[in-house]
Image: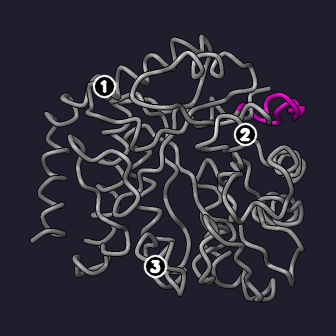
């Protein structure tokens, strides 16, 4: 019945954290910068989370690179994906660079006990400032092959991939963290552009995160609460068989769905397998107390659990592939 991914308070588990982790409906933990001091502490924290849960549990993070990288000191500085085409001249070089950045990001996280990074961003680089250079490119064609290379690197490291933010957040100016974005395009226009990326990559990614964006010419609610978007388009039309993970239900873009309990119920009814409730343990407790989680249609935790090829981060850094990746990083700084 596991369905909820929540956060913990700091660099070590509190009594309240341990109580929440014991709840059978908690599927995982999402970590933030406040949960990190150094790689050794992170490895201890992730081990403690797994030991406390006493069952399979997913440890996740937003660690794409660029502006969105939660762990800095001791980790490689992954660039924003939008700069790959700027620093590498040929498509072959760009694909190789994307692949190695995916491997580097995933290998370092996995070695510290983090199962999954919510990556890659599959949005188009457009007017949205919150997406911006997090996107690989400004057109679907380039995004598909660059993201494919990045995903390949993640897979080679032992990490599964989450494509976000379905069906596309890059073309709206408003930031769904603090606003309620509305995209007035038609279904045909969305599917021809942003949506085509998800359609082409649906068989290569293991999870999808919907956008807290309303597309009023298609459905009245944000995509993450829409049965039309998640079932008719993503599942039936795109034949996506993986895990659907809500974006944070406490973001402003989700507030149109009601109370946090109502948001959780509507997200589950629309087809989300896992729900994110971040930075408010009282809200997480309310969801756990009031929401009835259905029997899952797929074992989302096992689908997304990572498997490191290395025992420690020091082992990763001792590998020739890591050393080669560091030379590639110089392309972004030199």
Indicate the secondary structure of the residue bearing disc 3.
helix
In the shown orientation, is residue 169 left or right of residue 326?
right
- Give the quadrant of the N terminus: top right
Q: Which picture quadrant has residue 315?
A: top left
Marks 2/1: CA distance? Answer: 27 Å
Indicate the secondary structure of the residue bearing disc 1.
helix
Q: Which picture quadrant has residue 296?
A: top right
Query: Residue 236, position in %: x, y?
Result: 84, 60
Marks 2/3: CA distance? Answer: 40 Å
* Magenta stretch in the rendered image: 287-299
Marks 3/1: CA distance? Answer: 38 Å
Of 296 and 4, nearer the camera is 4
At 65% from the left and 52% from the top, the residue drawn is 248
N-terminal of the pair, mark 2 or mark 3, is: 3
In the shown orientation, is residue 276 left or right of residue 323?
right
Name the mark nearer the viewer: 3 or 1.
1
N-terminal of the pair, mark 2 or mark 1, is: 1
Q: Which residue is mark 3?
A: 142
Was residue 109 drawn as part of the magenta stretch in this picture?
no
In the shown orientation, is residue 274 left or right of residue 293?
left
Indicate the secondary structure of the residue bearing disc 2.
helix
Query: Residue 64, position in %: x, y?
Result: 41, 56
In the shown orientation, is residue 159 left or right of residue 275?
left
Q: Which residue is mark 1?
A: 41
Label 2 neighbour load within 10 Å: few <14, some 14-19, many 20+: some
Disc number at residue 283? 2
Q: Which picture quadrant has residue 27?
A: top right
């Amino acid at each position: 019945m596991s369905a909820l991914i929540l956060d913990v308070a700091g660099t070590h588990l509190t009594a309240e954290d341990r109580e929440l982790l014991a709840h059978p409906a908690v599927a995982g933990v999402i970590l933030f910068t406040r949960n990190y001091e150094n790689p050794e502490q992170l490895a201890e924290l992730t081990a403690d989370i797994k030991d406390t849960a006493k069952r399979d549990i997913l440890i996740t993070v937003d660690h794409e690179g660029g502006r969105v990288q939660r762990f800095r000191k001791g980790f490689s500085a992954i660039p924003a994906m939008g700069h790959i085409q700027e620093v590498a001249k040929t498509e072959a070089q760009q694909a190789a660079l994307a692949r190695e950045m995916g491997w580097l990001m995933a290998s370092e996280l996995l070695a510290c006990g983090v199962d999954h990074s919510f990556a890659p961003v599959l949005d188009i680089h457009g007017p949205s400032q919150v997406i911006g250079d997090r996107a690989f490119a400004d057109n679907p064609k380039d995004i598909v092959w660059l993201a494919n290379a990045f995903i390949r690197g993640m897979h080679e490291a032992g990490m599964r991939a989450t494509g976000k933010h379905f069906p596309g957040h890059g073309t709206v100016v408003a930031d769904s963290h603090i606003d309620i974005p509305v995209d007035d395009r038609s279904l045909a226009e969305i599917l021809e552009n942003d949506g085509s990326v998800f359609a082409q990559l649906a068989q290569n990614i293991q999870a999808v995160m919907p956008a807290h964006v309303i597309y009023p010419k298609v459905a009245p609610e944000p995509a993450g609460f829409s049965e039309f978007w998640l079932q008719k388009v993503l599942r039936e039309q795109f034949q996506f068989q993986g895990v659907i993970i809500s974006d944070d239900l406490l973001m402003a873009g989700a507030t149109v769905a009601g109370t946090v309990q109502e948001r959780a119920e509507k997200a589950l009814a629309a087809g989300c397998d896992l729900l994110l409730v971040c930075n408010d343990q009282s809200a997480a407790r309310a969801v756990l107390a009031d929401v009835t989680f259905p029997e899952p249609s797929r074992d989302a935790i096992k689908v997304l659990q990572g498997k490191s090829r290395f025992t420690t981060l020091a082992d990763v850094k001792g590998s020739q592939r890591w050393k080669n990746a560091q030379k590639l990083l110089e392309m972004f700084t030199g």
